[in-house]
Amino acid sequence: MKRSPYKIKLMVVGGGFAGLTLIEKLKGNSHFEITLIDRNNYNYFPPLLYQVATGFLDPASISYPFRKLFRNSDIRFRIGSVISIDTNGQRLLLDQGDELEYGILVLAAGARTNFYGNKNIEHYSTPMKTIDDALKMRNKLLGLFERAAVAKTEEERKRLLNIVIAGGGPTGVEVAGMLAEMKQNVLRKDYPELRNDLGTVYLVEGAPNLLQPMTVKTHSKVLQIMEKLKVRVYLNTLVSDFNGKEVILNSGEKIATETLIWAAGISANLFQGISNEVIGKGNRIQVEGTNQVLGIPNVFALGDMSIQTSDANYPFGHPQVAQVAIQQARHLGNNLKRLVKGFSMRDFVYKPKGDLAIIGRSNAVADLISGKLHLHGLAALFIWLFVHLRGLVQYRNKVVTLYHWVVAYLTNDISLRMVFNDKQTESSPEKDTVDTL
């Protein structure tokens, strides 16, 4: 791209980790006119969605409006979804019918839940990718508890209280731990009818270990914690099907339940106009070392959407985690600054900073310094707390979230246990409940 005396129209699609980090890196730079496009009018923090879903946090604790975030800046915001991209004419078509021109386009729209083609699981299970998913899950869980309290038979009660989680990565493990503690502490207090029959939390993982990328010490410790929390763990096992009443494992075993939480995989979001020739594993867009999309000038992809195989340490692509997205965005920001000054761009190299997971209220594990340092207990818990508070975008979010955590830790209780239904839902019981907080 040639140097230009005019501002370059930089379009960023997606306001998650990668998108916001890139904007922060280039904010105030006189060479760029930056516009963010997102289907929501707010940013949210995905690692804490499960705490919204289990009632430990309210949605406002982990989300913040883009327009308020960009107040008193020259960043522009457009709400909407990108329908197609004209890479030759350098235009975007939005769902409202508007066309936007770009000089540089950055795709950072993340990923969606991957159901691996199983329509039953897609229809009946509960994913954990958006605020809407978390609120639906919270309403569903609280509704199931109310139904279980008045269930006529033991069989019905168990089906309502049993919860199956597919996927033993950080999300699956953290959800399992939170739900197990919620059953032991909250349900015993609020539902005297259920004290002797709380159902079982099942965690199903296809790999040989929970938190598979972490160290052997962590694998062993996580299993110990799960056993203490009375979570039943299945390893080397897959969920084959779910009909809304029964989860079927690939071993043939059946688990009576109305709740399957799906945390077993993701697939990158795609847009019309990006050639199938550059789509790689998991629908991820293949990029060069600079994160430019292969064969498409002035278009870049970051985070979960991209797959880069030129990093010698990650020949099959980087892990789809927040740290990769953040580091790629910072690197691209520096590269774009170099580009407008006439210098060549440099290839991205990922530098892992460690892996963390919290299990329940007070158990956490951490692998740091490329797995050379393993921590668990309070030390790992404080590191987890610090990292996640730091990741929230505004001071208010940090304070409110910390307050809820301290209260939950000291009281062993949660306060966000209300189900709000709108009039449409009340008149249409077959529809999902809608939380109006």
Image (cartoon, rainbow, N blue to C red):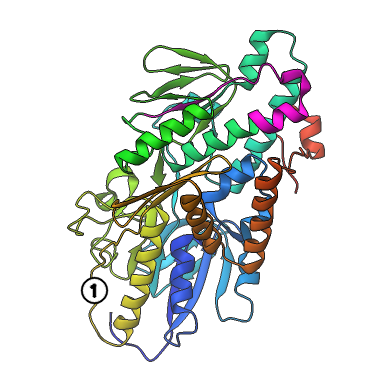
The residue under the point 48% across, 56% down is: 383
Residue 269 in view here: no
The residue under the point 36% across, 25% down is: 235
Position of 360 compared to 401: left or right? left
Q: Which residue is mark 1?
A: 346
Q: Quadrant of residue 424?
A: top right
From the viewer's perspective, is residue 73 above or below residue 395? below
x and y, in percent, of residue 341 in the image: 30, 88
Q: Is residue 187 magenta?
A: yes
**As drawn, which residue projects farthest toward the bottom?**
5
Q: Nearer the viewer, residue 85 or 22?
A: 22
| Tag 1 secondary structure | loop
**As drawn, which residue projects farthest toward the left?**
312
x and y, in percent, of residue 119 in the image: 47, 27
The residue under the point 44% across, 78% down is: 26
Q: Residues within 10 Å of mark 1 (few under 14, many from 20)?
A: some
Say what amino acid the circle numbered 1 marks.
Arg
Q: Is residue 337 magenta?
A: no
